[in-house]
Image (tube, helix red, strand yellow):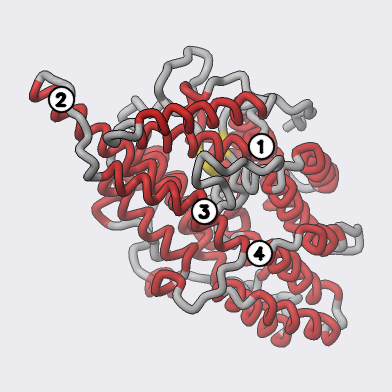
Amino acid sequence: PQTRFQDNHVSAVRQAMAMRGLHCFSSRSSFVAKRWFASASDVTPLTADILKYGVECLKNGKVDDALRTLEHGVTMIDDPAARGPVELLQGHLHVERGRHDAAVEAYKSLLGKERPPLLRMAAHESLAQLCLKEGEDQQAAAVVQSAMADASQAAPGSALMVRAYALTAFMYHASGDIAAAASLCGQAMQEWDRDAAGVDADRDARVASSLKYASAGLHATLSMADDDVLKNMGWAYLRTVNAAAAAEGLIDTDPISTLSALHVEADALLGYSQVLIARGLFTEAEKQLTVVMDMVEGPNGGEGIARTPGRVQRVGIVLSVLANLYRQRCIKERMGIEKQLGEKVHEDGGGSFILAEGLYQRAFQMLGCPTHLSQEMKTVPPVDAATVALMQGQYSRVLENIAGRQSEASRWRERAEKLWENMGASTTSLAVVMGEEVSTSITGNAIIDLRTGRLLMPLSKLEMRSPEP
């Protein structure tokens, strides 16, 4: 399918795919020509129309309109199998609107044994992600364990089993156990690809979210110093992007896959952008982040689109990654100048540091975090505390490079360190996560996850039994 990657970014990725005997479609026409549709489906024309309207409203921020329509529409659908996707979308709309309890209720209503297995799995995935987004790790772990038990009789390599394994892996990853996450994701993807003739976006659309989990697990375990990392990570994230793009068009025949893949494409591109930043490929990263911003904000900079809590958080996260790009690029440029001159260069108040400062301020504002030292952090941070601490630490490094802001920078760093320590779950220092220090015990990379707002890295180990293959 058509990819959002710019052509000049992905020559290495395409080369890597060609080495694997794979073909990456470059145009929408070739994608449409190839797509197949299931001959039988539980989706009635009425259900499809309701879902299309709801998804379009979700994209345009008209969440309340969609909820009213879906609440009425669901009463008109007698078949429980056809009604399920509409109820799943209702849960997504409640999440977007910031209605945690209503979303939990909607997702839990889909977990009954009378529901189709893939619908139950989609509800498990959505509920676990919501719990992780809200910092309810123990509840998320219980949901994931329930998902694994629910899929225990599924055939190896089936979409149901792969999604259960990948969801469990993401739970490990979000809780800091990268080794367990990578192992489980490896098992899941190995089973998924075992009998496949090759990578096919239509087939992958059924597990798009799982592919994102696997890409993040790979990202977290590879050393950015490896020359082949860009190819490997680009290929993994590109596969996810293509799967999510394919899932968009399946709402008439496989709406569960469509609804499970919401925001996955933007999430995968954000992950790939973070790979590019770590590799110092700032121009390519900036272009990708511009594409991601268009996805999360909407056309015309989001003009005329309601700023729902979900949309605001996604925009804030993307802004923070973009700010980090400008911060790191300016540092690299300054180091090059200092090397040439043989002396320390002092910031004169201009350049990318000023731009980065403004972006961090805007990100803090959108995420509901303090924008000034006089403001106190809420008892429960609006997003993952580790993500906020990382942003504050990066922000302090920006300020210390701006003339007259060194004292303020020191105080921001103290605040970041305090928040990091107060999490009570991290055995890794903030300096290591920010790349200021090297740790021989940590080989992974920190990744900000778009859909949950979590900082994915080795923070802590959650007591949880690893499922047998």
Real-space Cα distance between discs 1 and 3?
32 Å
Residue at 8% of width from left, 23% of height from top?
341
Report helix, strand or loop for mark 3. helix
Disc 2 marks which residue? 338
Residue 365 x/y as whole percent: 52, 53
Residue at 61% of width from left, 61% of height from top?
310
Q: Amino acid at mark 1?
A: Ala
Pointer 3 and pointer 4: residues touching (CB < 8 Å)?
no
Residue 379 x/y as whole percent: 71, 40
Which numbered mark, 2 or 4, is in the foreground of this view?
2
Disc 4 marks which residue? 96
Residue at 67% of width from left, 43% of height from top?
378
Which numbered mark, 1 or 4, is in the foreground of this view?
4
Q: Amino acid at mark 2?
A: Glu
Whether residue 285 is visible here, answered yes or no, is yes
Q: Amino acid at mark 3?
A: Gln
Q: For this rendering, which residue is in front, 100 or 37? A: 100
In this rendering, is residue 194 above or below 127? Answer: above
Residue 83 placement, left or right of 97: right
Label 3 or label 4, whichever comes before in sequence order: 4
Q: Quadrant of residue 408?
A: top left
| Other-residue count near label 3 (Cα within 10 Å), few / some / many at <14 / 14–19 / ≥20 | some
Label 3 or label 2, whichever comes before in sequence order: 2
User: Which label belongs to residue 365?
Assistant: 3
In this rendering, is residue 445 above or below 285? Answer: above
Label 1 or label 2, whichever comes before in sequence order: 1
Label 1 or label 4, whichever comes before in sequence order: 4
Residue 147 placement, left or right of 250: right
